Image: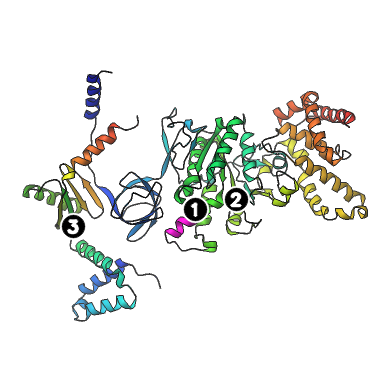
Amino acid sequence: MSNSTIVENLRKEIDSFSSQVRAEKVGHVVEVFDGIAKVSGLSDVKSSEMVIFPNGETGVALNLEEDTVGAVILDDFSKIKEGDEVKATGKILEIPVSDNLMGRVINSLGVPVDGKGAIKAGKDGMQTYPIEKVAPGVITRLGVSEPVSTGIKVIDATIPIGRGQRELIIGDRQTGKTAIAIDTILNQKGQNLICIYVSIGQKDSKLRKLQTRLEKGGAMAYTVIVSAGASLPAPLLYIAPYAGVAIAEYFMDQGKDVLIIYDDLSKHAIAYREISLLLRRPPGREAFPGDVFYLHSRLLERACRRNKEHGGGSITALPIIETQAGDITAYIPTNVISITDGQIFLETDLFYKGIRPAVNVGSSVSRVGSYAQIKAMKKVAGTLKLDLAQYRELEAFAQFGSDLDESTKKQLERGKRAVEILKQPQYAPVVAERQVTVLYALTKGYMDDVPVDKIKEFEEGLLNYAENNAKKFYKEIIETKMWSEAGEAELKKTIEDFKGGFK
Amino acid sequence: MANISNIDIARAIYLACKDNIGNKPSFLKDVVKFLARRRFLYRAKDILLNLEKIIHEESGTIVAKVKSARILSEETKREITHSLKKLYSAHKVLYKKSMDENLLGGMRIEVNDEIIDLTVKNKVKKLQEYLTRKV
């Protein structure tokens, strides 16, 4: 391009520029500390409105007081001085969204942090979505009826999750909470479900490992990661889940199904406690502010399944809560348990006993998911949850082995095998038809005479054998989600044939 | 008892003065005594600022902080006064003037928490934002 063309273009651009002068609302920084700024003026500012500091730093007005406005600063606050001018924008905090977010790692403000360059605008250009939005109303909603297949046997069989559900994953540190979330993402290949993973206050190394794992499994093609690492100031941690759900809403508005994982909301509550205490809001139980329930309820209420008339699509939320020494009666765990539609409870004891995923089936529950379970799974897993719960109770009596009656002994033996079958290594999701095959063999008693230490071997062998010999049954499960009599007969024959040759 | 804000105290003082109670010789002393008793003396500066605001509001006066690159002519000042009176429905305009050559030209008027920026510096900044915008 020649110099004259550049000058000509510049001239055209300048000619098309028109600046309108209008009165702008401003305030002045009275004090600034720990990521919080007290600002005088800004009389018409709204709650959660974006404000701009002189060097371009963004803030959010949270505390609207008589003389001052308390704003949290979302960027580096070291350059903000007392007396600096603060401008109101009239806009609620929003983040840029587009289809090109898929496969990217962004921060709470929508800025990419994966070193892969700027996020390009999608087909509809670059849109912005507000991070705070009122959840869809009753009229727009639809009951949960489609499953989210996690690929984890114990969850799909006993605590099924439906699209649009909110299922809490709760447990102590190092019990495999994130592993469940990651396995669920990995299992969504070809399932038409977009995944969003929101990391709140996690170590950057953990997130990097997770991203590599997802890339390896080909899951980043349908996944967006929102990262608010432990090194970032509390305000960025506070807005991260809302940014994540704003992205989810963008995809849901296109009629798509979305799965969002908040890892974890305990750290989110702690970040909010920090902000609230700095804003001098009165502390309540465990020093959390009074509105900590609303903090999570308004976030999780945005998970929903919308009916066709209102655009369709769904947001399934899997919030994670970390408990301290298994105490689920602490403030935040009880709050989130009451908000969600069930919980997957992970226990340290089970984890160290080698039962992984360490799901305590007795304490775990899914309030709406069973409506979404496929028919075949419902049939094979119908009594599994009860059987397992009874087995746990009877387990205590196991030491009196010889004094037990025949039916109790049988129940114990079945329970032992069920526990063994439900064990599953990490990053190895199992598809629905294979799950049904194994659970069918278990619940119909085909495994009762297989020694417990050979159950895994039996399972593996059966699945490989069925792959080639129960094709009709597999096809039926995939297509109709249920088996016919002929399919069942084929499966029975397959299991019997395999068992005949199993030593 | 609920917290009494600075504006509440300032308004009370204003209303007392208006109702002739303020003419009592001991009035000022009483106000200071009240502030001392409630341990509000540290808020005196803010209370006075609020009182000033209330007095201006009630008397239809506005305070305009005008920052310009050069000294304003009487003609310009008259024009500004006319416009501001119209814009804010005010009877009287008080000025706090200052000079700043960095503004390059034009002026910047601040009334309450509103700013009307007519400086060349601001225009250049807006042009820069326009030319470097994402297309």
Q: Is residue A2 visible?
A: yes
Residue that numbered label 2 is attached to: A321
Nearer the observer: mark 3 or 1; the answer is 1
Dot 2 lies on which element? strand
User: Could you tell whether A42 is left or right of A250 in the image?
Assistant: left
- Magenta stretch holds residue A275: yes
- Please state the horizontal and vertical placement of residue A437, each as a whole percent of the image: 78, 33
Residue B75 position (above or below residue A449): below
The residue furthest top is A2
Q: Which of A446 and A216 is in front in this view?
A: A216
Q: Which amino acid does label 2 sit on?
A: Ile
For the point 15% across and 43% down, the residue is B106
How far is mark 3 from mark 2, CA to CA?
54 Å
- Please state the horizontal and vertical placement of residue A272, each as a whole percent of the image: 48, 54
Provide the major secondary structure of the magenta segment. helix
Residue that numbered label 1 is attached to: A271
- Magenta stretch holds residue A413: no
Dot 3 lies on which element? strand
| Marks 1/2 same chain | yes
Q: Which amino acid does label 3 sit on?
A: Val
Q: Can residue A245 be seen in this view?
A: no
For the point 34% across and 76% down, the residue is B38
Chain letter for mark 3, please: B
Look at the image and give the residue range highlighted in magenta: A273-282
Q: Which amino acid does label 1 sit on?
A: Ala
User: Which quarter of the figure has residue A188?
Assistant: top right
For the point 72% across and 43% down, the residue is A356
For the point 62% across and 41% down, the residue is A181
Query: Which one is earlier in the sequence, the residue at label 1 or at label 2?
Result: 1
